[in-house]
Amino acid sequence: MSGEPGRFKVARFKRSPRCPLFKAIAQFFRTGADALPLTDEAEIKRKYRRGRISVFLSITLGYAMYYVIRQGFAVVKKPLLEAGLFDPLQIGTIGSVFFMTYMIGKCVNGFLADRLNIKRFLALGLLGSASLLVSLGFCSSFYLFAVLWGLCGWFQTFGAAPCVVSLNQWFSNKERGTLYGIWFSAHNIGTGLTYIITAYIIATHGWRMGFFAPGVLGISAAVFLYLFMYDRPPVYGLPPISVYSGEQTHAEHKAKDKPVFKAQFAVIIRPAVWVLGLSSAACYVTRYAFESWGVVFLTEAKGYSLTKASGIISISQFAGIVGAVSCGWISDKFFHHKRSVPCLLFGILFVLSTATFVYVPAGYPWSDYVSMIFFGYAVYALVTYLGGLMAVDICSKKATGAAMGVIGLFSYAGASLQEAVGGYLINAHKVIGADGKAIYDFTAVGNFWVVASVFALVLPLLVWNAKQED
């Protein structure tokens, strides 16, 4: 035995219970092997039609549910402040923890999504984040709340990149802008319904039910995703979408089919992707400022009730549906799939509506309604472009997840910065009134939101003529 130490160590390693478990987990998430290619054109067309319908419905409804899970916290903030459980700095810290884990996870899981079984990956992320949301309904500790919300942020990163990878696997380049916009509008639907329904649930049943109800709904939706989502087309014997749509022949597809690692590395080192990432980060500062602090801003600075303030903020979500859907169609229809000109136009509208919402004083409710309509329309058009579509356009299809991951890293660094800086500025500029109630001054944080919107307008000009890679 002493003469064969190497063999003894190998034998012990093989008997370790961790290896089979890790292998089983990796195998569960690995994308399936390519099946024997189908030759019957009618069968190929039938299977593609069924798969495309199921995939698009699954990623759209599933992505909406991801946002129902995550946006409830924005509505719960005011009741948490009123209950004295947390102060604005603690709430900002909790939100920042979420975005930090989301930022890292979005990048890591974006790279993984290019290699994984999207059907299983997407369903597990929704199941994990929904289960954690239910757990938060039982929590009153600041530190435990921050940890659980941070873990929820990690599971939330199983959503966007896998959805876009699947969209690229099942739909052609000519369809991408329009369908990306329709898919992306799902999060507006989820967020808008959350502002209305969750606010009502909290008002009638307390803040804990604001976590319980959407959490249980999310668990049910995860089961739906697992049953109806699809893996890559070749797993079912179907040709790649570029071949099926007539954009390439089999020979051309094979010649340009570079290894995933090389395609992903090209994304990392490309300056245009970094500029788009910084642009998206600036956009996300203002986007999440309004989504996270808009209800508090309207109740504290402009005197609205919780339900009224939530209703006003929800307007931006429904206007955002129009913005997200139309921006892809506009660029595909009128600008030959180019995004730079419409991005500039939406950016100007974004800055003007942000400044109107922040700087017009209380007493002009029409201004708040109008600014939310135009803000929602503009910001979600920009988020569609800057938050993924423009990067996907200029990167290889083999690295769609990587492109989404890098952009997501920047985007949610901006969102995390907003939570931390916003919470600090709001807390630093509060005074305690004679009745012992805190009074908040939003001047400094409002300036921060407007300046960020200006950067989101200017930075995309640096990549005006970026070209697509093979």
Image (tube, rainbow, N blue to C red):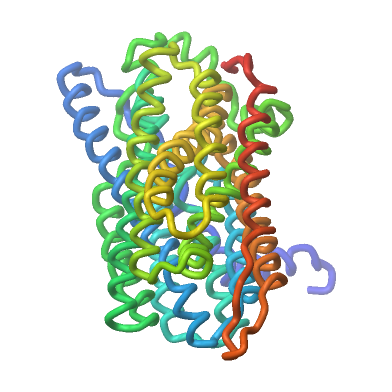
Q: Position of residue 352 (x, y in %)?
A: 54, 37
Residue 465 visible in the snapshot: yes
**Residue extending farthest bottom:** 435
Q: Quadrant of the C terminus?
A: top right
**Residue extending farthest right:** 3
Residue sitting at x 16%, y 26%: 46
Residue sitting at x 67%, y 78%: 431
Q: Position of residue 117 (x, y in %)?
A: 42, 45
Looking at the picture, tell me which residue is in the foreground, 382 or 106. Answer: 382
Task: Name above or below for residue 36 compared with residue 73.
Answer: above
Task: Name above or below for residue 149 compared with residue 269.
Answer: below
Task: Name above or below for residue 86 compared with residue 77.
Answer: below
Looking at the picture, tell me which residue is in the foreground, 353 or 335. Answer: 353
Residue sitting at x 32%, y 46%: 318
Residue 16 visible in the snapshot: no
Q: Position of residue 340 (x, y in %)?
A: 55, 20
Task: Name above or below for residue 306 compared with residue 327.
Answer: below
